[in-house]
Image: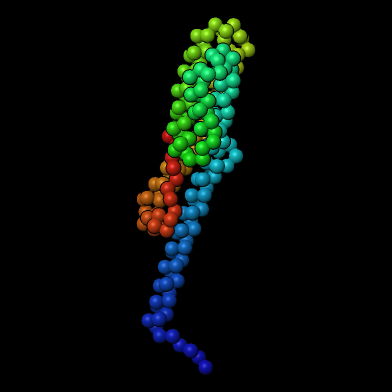
Amino acid sequence: MKFNLPTWLCAVLALVLVAFGLVFGTWSGYREDRADVTALLEADNGLMDVLSYRAADGLNLCVVARRHLGADDADVLALEQSARALQQSTDLNVRRTEDAKLTVNVADVSARLNASQSFLASQRDQKYLEMLTADLNNLKGSTAVTVYNEAAHAFNQKLGGSLFGTLASMLGVQACPVYQ
């Protein structure tokens, strides 16, 4: 006994299968693309690690500054606060804000140190400051920042620039935050 489906039902089933394939393929493809961009953010030596290294250098500068400016100096405390917030936050927007504060605070503390007689008498601490500021500047210009931002921009443009990207957005795929 052979069972035949009506032609209209076969056409509806075919359309449902095609629609499911398009929806699932779009969702999974964009999700995988976003995971690739997120890996540049969270993987070893990714952007989050670079920001954590900058925070560690800021905290190391606090140790040097306390020897010459005192433990309760307002600039040193501000530097420590921004370095700790940069180190502990998991939100990229908060990290961006705290990194900007860290840059300003490092400049303030460095200027104050260079005006301190005890600091100028310590060649060891002068070399340490030079090394820390060079490292902070190298990390600020790290390729991890550029590579992540380029990948995030490309993904966001792809997500917002096509019908399938719009479909993926409606299915819950979110744009990647950009670090600038």
x and y, in percent, of residue 92 in the image: 47, 39
54 or 94, which is in the foreground? Answer: 94
Above or below: residue 58 compared with residue 2: above
Looking at the image, what colour scheme do you see? rainbow
Count how many numbered circles sit on residues in the image.
0
Viewer can see residue 153: yes
State left or right for residue 19 relative to residue 43. Answer: left
x and y, in percent, of residue 86 in the image: 51, 32
Above or below: residue 21 compared with residue 57: below
Q: Residue furthest front?
A: 72
Above or below: residue 133 compared with residue 47: above
Pick the quarter of the image with the C terminus: top left
Q: Residue furthest right?
A: 124
x and y, in percent, of residue 102 in the image: 48, 26
Residue at 47% x, 63% y: name it: 24
x and y, in percent, of residue 40 in the image: 53, 42
Viewer can see residue 139: no
Residue at 49% x, 58% y: name it: 28
Asked which quadrant contains residue 18, the reply is bottom left
Residue at 46% x, 58% y: name it: 27
Residue at 43% x, 50% y: name it: 174
Q: Residue furthest bottom?
A: 1
